[in-house]
Amino acid sequence: MIEISINGLVKSFEIGKNVLDGITFQVESGERVGLLGRNGAGKSTLFKILTGELEADEGEVSVAKNRRLGLISQIPVYPEGYTVDDVLHTAFARHRKLAEEMEKLTAAMAAGDSSEQTLRRYGELSAKFEGIGGYDTDTAVNKVAAGLSIPPEMRIQLFDSLSGGEKTRVNLGRLILEDTDILLLDEPTNHLDLHAVEWLEEYVRRFRGTVVAISHDRYFLDRTISRVIEISDGKAEFYPGNYTFYAIEKERRYQEKMKQYEKEQAKIKQLQEAADKLHLWAFMGADKLHKRAFSMERRIERIRQTEKPVKARALTNRFGEKEFLGDEVMHIKGIEKSFGGRKLFHGLDLRVEGGERIALIGDNGTGKSTLLKILMGEEQPDDGRVKFGPTVRPAYLPQIIRFDSPHRSLVDTMLYSKRGITTQTARDRLGAFNFRGEDVFKPVSVLSGGEQSRLRLCILMDEEINLLVLDEPTNHLDIASREWIEEAVEAYEGALLFVSHDRYFINRFATRIWELENGVITDYPVPFARYKEIKERDKALAQSQARNEKREEKPKPVPKGSRAQQNARRQLTICERDMEKLEAEIKAAEAEMEANACDYEKYSASYAKKEALDAQLLELMDRWEKLAEEAEV
């Protein structure tokens, strides 16, 4: 069944420049589609047209009848005084409507109305209310809030008092609770920590409806989508696979087009040279040769079919590096910091040595950015100190970029930041970061957050440094811009300390993990993949231990004749074994998916297998809960 149909869609905001230029595609029921393209390509515009927020200039857009469509993008405005809990419960508008009608019928029945019509209507509403989980809304809210790291103390706060990232998280929770049929996700991972991103991934993978996601998180895309639609220059190109498949296939198509283009150019050159010679000979007396030359030129025109394929320019600048002398880059001694009576961290004692690449990770609000600011001298600790090596020269890219004079143009900002460079040199460096042409004369104040990060990085790259500190360097950047930063970091050989929720970035660069949790840092002197293995092993051991402890608990005394309870306990044991077996099969299916990421057919088969296993596990979990109640465990 076709859920979304787009036919010949055209949209422009400037005369003669179409953001969307005749895009046509369909999304089938249950599909997981990733909508990719550089920032400004028109992805969010397409979403707004789908939801009716914008109107298309031309073309048709249709969504299947009676399908509920939910978008997480802009944050809606809620009534003044709404708490986070109030916002989350707005997802249950249908439930409230049914409950209100049931209350009216209950009052009517209490007043003596016992007509068949009233009783039948109440029965219908009651069954429907139970079917949509009307009696379990608080349980649903608690599960989603826990998964998205929305603690109880945040749930009683006013929604308007939250930060942008917190509002995004709450709004995502509301959308999930609405139980829509078609989920539109516009950069859902931008303000989520690792724990929340992984929870969202699992939710999307188990979601039984249709998903269309705009995301620059390559891990998220690999684990949640099975088809890519790339928007470029107003057109759409299709890739039947996940992100890894898309990246490989896109390069293959580029090389194939380039070979075709070069082959055609070689043929054109050969024919043009022959035609030029014929014209020359014709001028020398053989007039009939003009006809043959014109024939060749018409043949050349027929050959001109393949446009030269283009690829995003690679980053040409790199960080200037200062020679590092000694072993110790930095020593953090007994650092403590509190805000408003809440202790962020205490007793931190850590060392950084030359060449180390450290990822500082942890949930939002644990104090990662604050710690970086303390290290860079922008905040003062309550106790402890930071000692740098004598030859250390640090550079810092904060999460929120600020410029002293945002009214200045980009080129002037470069000239004031780098004394002694020429205007042409400044423009060349800006060009390497995709600031070209008239863009370099725009004031810094009109740049987006991602563009400001790129500009700050452009300035940092010319400095001689040996300690690079980055706070969420890939936030708000499209995939091409992330790859530029990664190329620069790859070429940099000094010490690196960074905060990031981009697992691709962490996995590529981190040789050591600092996990900030409950006010202390646990040091894992291993790469990210090994860290994940350790965490998964610890989690599995904890779950196994909890199950064993539960089994070892003395059973409650069973009243004589309670055969139903005894049977429920036997079935419960069988159910637990089946759940363990399914969990192992799901893990094996996930490993198959990763191994087959570049083979669409095998990946699809593994994905379908995992979906079926997930459904079986959900059924078993429901059965386990019922049996547990029957057995009074």
Image (cartoon, helix red, strand yellow):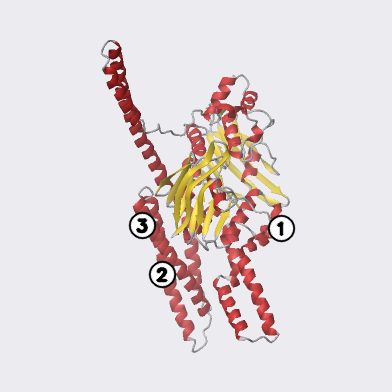
* Residue with the mark numbered 3: 605
Residue 122 shown left or right of residue 306 in the figure: right
Q: In front of the other: label 3 or label 1?
A: 1
N-terminal label among 3 and 1: 1
Residue at 66%, 40% (x, y): give it.
374
N-terminal label among 2 and 3: 2
Residue 79 shown left or right of residue 333 in the figure: right
Residue at 67%, 76% (x, y): give it.
103
Residue 487 shown left or right of residue 395 in the figure: left
Q: Is residue 239 above or below residue 291?
A: below
Residue 347, horizontal then vertical, whole percent: 64, 47
Q: Are marks 2 and 3 in contact (CB under 8 Å)?
A: no
Q: Is residue 36 above or below residue 318?
A: below
N-terminal label among 2 and 1: 1
Say what secondary structure mark 2 lies in.
helix
Q: Are marks 3 and 1 in contact (CB under 8 Å)?
A: no
Q: In front of the other: label 2 or label 1?
A: 1
Say what secondary structure mark 1 lies in.
loop
Q: In front of the other: label 2 or label 3?
A: 3
Q: Amino acid at mark 3?
A: Ala
Q: Amino acid at mark 2?
A: Asp
* Residue with the mark numbered 1: 79
Residue 250, horizontal then vertical, whole percent: 40, 41
Cα separation, mark 3 vs mark 1, equals 47 Å
Q: Badge 1: how crowded within 10 Å, few (<14), some, or many (20+)?
A: few
Say what secondary structure mark 3 lies in.
helix
Residue 222 has which mark? none
* Residue with the mark numbered 2: 578
